[in-house]
Every structure is written in structure tokens, then in C-alpha cells.
Amino acid sequence: MKTKDNQGPLWEVFTQKKQGQPFRHSGSIHAYDKNLAIEAARDLFTRRNEGTGLWVVKSEHIIDVQPEDAESFFEPANDKIYRHPTFYEIPDGVKNM
Amino acid sequence: MKKNTEQLEREFQEKIDNEVKIEPKDWMPDAYRKNLIRQISQHAHSEVIGMQPEGNWITRAPSLRAKKILLAKIQDEGGHGLYLYSAAETLGVSRDTFLQWLHEGKAKYSSIFNYPTLNWADMGAIGWLVDGAAIVNQVSLQKTSYGPYSRAMVRICKEESFHQRQGYEIMTKMARGTKEQKQMAQDALNRFWWPALMMFGPHDSDSAHSSQSLKWKIKRESNDTLRQRFIDKTIPQAELIGLTVPDPDLELQPNGSYKTGEINWDEFWNVVKGNGPCNKQRLAHHKKAHDEGRWVREACLAFAEN
């Protein structure tokens, strides 16, 4: 994709609704540099006080799992049911556990 | 092991049938991708071109309150265009290509924005009727099968409800004002009613893309279903403020639903084909704004590269 007149590279925007909450992906924007990106993200995604925190990151810096690899990539978790609390047998009537 | 196309198509349709969203890097049929590129970009262009009829009244808004509201609404429309362009770009077409297709006339936008805004009452009619119709459509599209499009719709619907309410507030004030003001409100309703009904597109029996779009859940409900929902919501709203929908054949049926007269489809196709009152003006203005902004984009790029 050429960037010559494409309104700059693509950035992913993450907003935090309230302090203490996790940042969530809000969407993407085009911007030429990080200062313009964070201001554009503010104008686009927090016009109604939707954010107390804001991150932008260039999309090209995000590493993801390709859908066709997802099954084998996440497979190692499948046979480790002992990681879930429901795996364990505990006596009836035990409290606070 | 590589899957063949038949297998991929079957798995794709299974996901759709099970309400699993399709994400950008998932396999999808070419026609699904093409259909989405057309629909989402058309939707994005509509948001941005839709800024023009209202922009026409910013400097002549009747009060500072009205002006601030109008500015905020138009800014929202621009934002909605950006959400939608981003969603469309995930399908592999760049932002500048979408603009190029718009400027070349290859991509369309909603015909409603090819009608002129003659006076302040039109700001009321647009918010109430045009945004009202858009909301009915967009609420339904929140459940569209393509993830990025669906997420854009959810955001847009959250922001859009103020648009309709501010429009209805303008209409209410004018309808309850002087005789002349009420007449202006009625005149705006007269001019925008039929074009608003046309926003939902041709009848289901004449709609080129409908059945495949429904099977793929790009669209969730048919044109006629959505149009009827809008009609049934809007007519009581008109009655409440003493305005009359310009349709001599309008009939309240026993089931509480309204039957309207026939839409003038010659007018619809004429505007779609580029012969509406403002088609040339809207496109020329968009090109001009884009060209005049080029030096800003170039300056930003030069600064970023240094």
C-alpha cells in the first residue's frame, strides 16, 4: 500500500474508559506521525468523554496470529485441564474455596 | 494440508450460519469481499458527502446553541466516515483508492445528499428523517457478519441518536412557532419524506444485491422490512407535532402498520444515475476540498520524514 497521498500510515487506537480498567481496541486511524496520531485519536474516539487514557501504535508494529495457524498455535492449552479449578475433586461441604 | 475452495466455502458459510463474525484475515469468497468493499465504502462516502448539505447552514444557524449542535453533528458524520473507511480498508483497498473511485464516479453514496438544503427547517428534516432512516438501517447492520463493519456500526449507533433528536427538536420548535415557521417545517417534510423512503433502496423484488447479501448476513433485513419499520416509527412522530406526511394514499392498516402510496422510482433511478439536483455540486466540492488540502498532507509527510 503506498503512503504517498494516503493520509499517512495506519495506527491502532486503544482507549481506557475509566482509570483502573484495561485498555481496549477502539479502531484505527491514519496519521503522519505520533503527535498527529494521538491528537486525531482523541478527536475521533473520545469526543464524549469515552477515555481517561489513550494509546496509539503503528499497525505495522502489531504481531498477530494468522487465522490458518490459530488452531495449532493455541493447541498446547487444550490438554491442560488441570489449569482450571473445576478439574479438582474436593470434599462436599468444604467452605470458602 | 491445503483445503480446497469447496471446503473453505462450506466452513465460511457454517461460520455465518452460526453467527461467528468474519475477521479481515479469515478466508472469504471473492464475491463476499467485493460486496463488502462496495457497501462499506458507499456507506463511508455517504457520511462524508452528507456533511455538505448541513455544512451549508453553519454560518446561518439561528443561534449560538444551534450552531454548536450543528458543528458537533457534522463532526460526528466525518468521524463516522473515518470509522467506515478504516473498516473498508481491512479488505485490502487503500484509503486513497476509495477516494479515487469516488472522484471517478465508480463508487456511489446515498442519493439523499443530492437534494439541496433550502432553509433552516431542512436541518430539522435531515436530522429527524435522514438520520432517522439511517439509524433504522444501521441498528440492523450492527449484526452484520463482517467484524470490522459490525464494530463500526455499534460505535456509530451510539453516537447517532443525538442526531435524530436534535432534528426532531428543530421540527417541533418550528411546528409550534409562527404560522410561517410551521409552514416551513411542513415544506421541509414535504420535500424530504419521499427521498427518505428511497434511502432504503429498491423494493426487495428489484434489489440486485439483496438475496446474496442476506445469505451472507452482510445485510440482516430486507429493504422493504427496514423501510416499513421507519414509516411506522415516523408517522406518529409527525402527527404529534401537527405535521402531515405528503402522501394522499397513506392508510393505517388494522395491524397498526401504515401502507404508503407508491414511491416514484423514476426519480430514484434518475438521482442514482447522477441527475439529481446536486450530484455535480457535491462531487465537485469534495474534489476541491481534497485538492486544496493536498499541501497540508504534503507538509505533514515532509515533517514526519525529517
Image (cartoon, coloured by chain):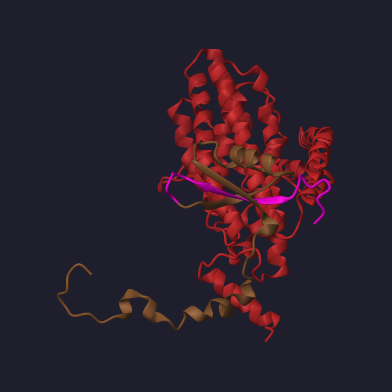
> Residue at image x 74%, y 50%?
A9
Q: Quadrant of residue B134?
A: top right
Q: Quadrant of the C terminus of chain A?
A: bottom left
Q: Residue at the location (79% across, 46% down)?
A: B99
Q: Position of residue A26 (x, y in %)?
A: 56, 50
Residue at position x 68%, y 23% in the image: B118
Chain A: its colour in the image is brown
Q: Position of residue B163 (x, y in %)?
A: 54, 34
B239 to the left or right of B102: left
Taking the magenta stretch, the answer to whether it contains residue A17 is yes
Q: Is residue B205 above or below residue B261?
A: below
Q: Colour of chain B?
A: red
Closer to the camera, B210 or B2?
Answer: B2
Give x and y (percent) for residue B146.
60, 61
Q: Which residues are magenta?
A: A1-21
Q: In which quadrant of the rendered image does the N terminus of chain A lie?
A: bottom right
Q: Residue A82 location, x and y as percent? A: 37, 80
Q: Is residue B250 visible?
A: no
Magenta stretch encompasses residue B298: no
Question: Residue drawn 66% across and 41% down?
Answer: B47
Whether residue B46 is visible here, answered yes or no, is yes
Farthest residue, direction bottom: B1
Q: Quadrant of residue A2?
A: bottom right
Outermost residue toward the left in this view: A93
Kindly report the secondary structure that dominates the magenta region of the rendered protein: loop
